[in-house]
Image (spheres, rainbow, N blue to C red):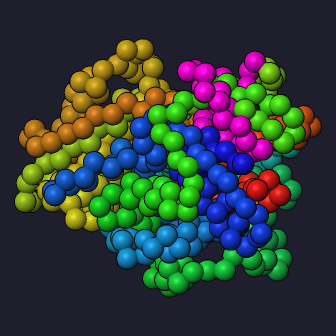
Amino acid sequence: MTAILGGGLGGLSTGYYLLKNNMNSNNNLKLFLLEATNYCGGWIKSIRTKDYVFEQGPRTIRPKGLTGLNTLNMMQDLGLSEHIAPIKSDHPAANIRMIYVRNNLHTLPSNLMSVFTKSQPFSKPLIYALFNDIKSPYKILPDDSIYNFVERRFGKEIADYAISPMICGICAGDAKEISVKFLMKTLFEYEQNHGGVIKGLFKSFLKPKSDTDLDLSELAKKAQEEKWNVYTIKGGLETFPDTLQNHLIENNVNVSLNTKVNEIEFVDSSSVVLKQANGETHTANHVYSSIPAYALANLVKKQHPRLAQTLSDIPFVTVGIVNLYFDKDEPLIQPAFGFLVPPIENSPILGVVFDSCCIPDQKGTVLTVMLGGKWYKEKFGENATEKMLLEVALKEIVKILDIKIDPTAYHVNILKQCIPQYVIGHYERVAKIREYIASNNLPISLVGCSYDGVGINDVIYSAKQQVEENPCLQG
């Protein structure tokens, strides 16, 4: 008997891969999933109407790289190919991304020629950043913040106006705290091994390219051929976890909602008991935990306080989401993906996504304002209300986008402790957690955004890897 703890995308994907691997073996898989809330899907949640879709969490998926292609394989296998809406490389949402600096919106460079041209807010053409890398000294470091690394290699302006807002958009975090290995592990290794990024790039060109062993689906091949930038699902991204959940149920996985576990007891290396507050228990040979690290810490602290402490050391941030719908025939914004606000601007918002440009079948103008993140408590205090966030969002929309009419519809959500922060030392911390589990022969595997990446593709691929690393534990 195998248990999955948590019905977010990590838990659902774990169930998918356990079923998939079981089809190729003779194991008699008995699998159950426990979810504390009344729905599966985690932070992926869509509000659908005939006129608009409000996305409460992620709204698009990147098709690039091994993890992106792996997700597309899953999409096709689940029968979602016909529901996918791609944004190709020539679409405004793919090549027009802006930042708000000194009371103005600036379009970031998006092609090779633009790096040779001076564009605000940068004081020089971006090609000068490459010269900075060539002439700059380097430090031997086990890890560093992504801000420090970029400032050292490419200059302060790149760190302030390119990397810092990008980190806000990806994980609502502070680039001065986030590990360089979060997004730039390879570039950091170039610096550490070769003295600079450009030097490392040149040497990497001389090495033979290693092919992945991933067999591409027709959908994945299509994404490559048509040069998709990102994609979403018609009718809302929530269709994805809904389809995954139905797939599990159709394959005899027992999915239990409103089932909150408050303690995990490890009996031995092949027996674990999941205890509920009402006294009910669930026994399994192995458990895959997809819940946040801080939540898992509370469940294991009685038996394994050291493990609980290390899990608790992974910080999380809260993000406010304000969705706005304006029922006007003429667009209120220029076609673009949206804009981000660098932390140096000291703004109450992280950025705005132009959903009516990114998501199909939207009428009027649809925007999503993101607030808080690393600075949530600083900007809004301990007891921020949805009304407060709405007022701030509308004020910033008037100031930045000059939209002075009231929205026809809106929705505000406060996503508490929703995104983990991969601060300096994160990957060493995760290795320490997994080493503790291995050395104590605990029958548990860790999946989800707390450990191996915060994006949708990362979470899915993490589930795939953890299932493949424990093939003998599925029966």
- Residue 241: image location, x then y, percent: 46, 55
When asked about the image quadrant of residue 274, the answer is: top right
Quadrant showing the C terminus: bottom right
In the rendered picture of this protein, how many numbered marks are placed on residues?
0
Identify the residue shown where x is 50% and y is 79%: 219
- Residue 374: image location, x then y, percent: 51, 29
Residue 103 as seen in the image, left or right of residue 77: left
- Can you name the residue that lies furthest to the top here? 382
Residue 194 as seen in the image, left or right of residue 387: right
390 part of magenta stretch: no
Identify the residue shown where x is 39% and y is 71%: 84
Residue situated in front as seen by the camera: 306 or 344: 306
Whether residue 10 appears in this view of the structure is yes
When asked about the image quadrant of residue 440, the answer is: top right
Whether residue 454 appears in this view of the structure is no
Residue 352 as seen in the image, left or right of residue 344: left
Give the vertical position of 197 relative to 216 (above or below).
above
- Residue 244: image location, x then y, percent: 49, 59
- Can you name the residue that lies furthest to the right here? 439
Identify the residue shown where x is 64% and y is 63%: 19
Give the vertical position of 298 relative to 125 (above or below).
above
Residue 331 as seen in the image, left or right of residue 254: left
- Residue 338: image location, x then y, percent: 33, 53
Residue situated in front as seen by the camera: 135 or 89: 89
Identify the residue shown where x is 70% and y is 66%: 22
Read off the magenta span.
274-302
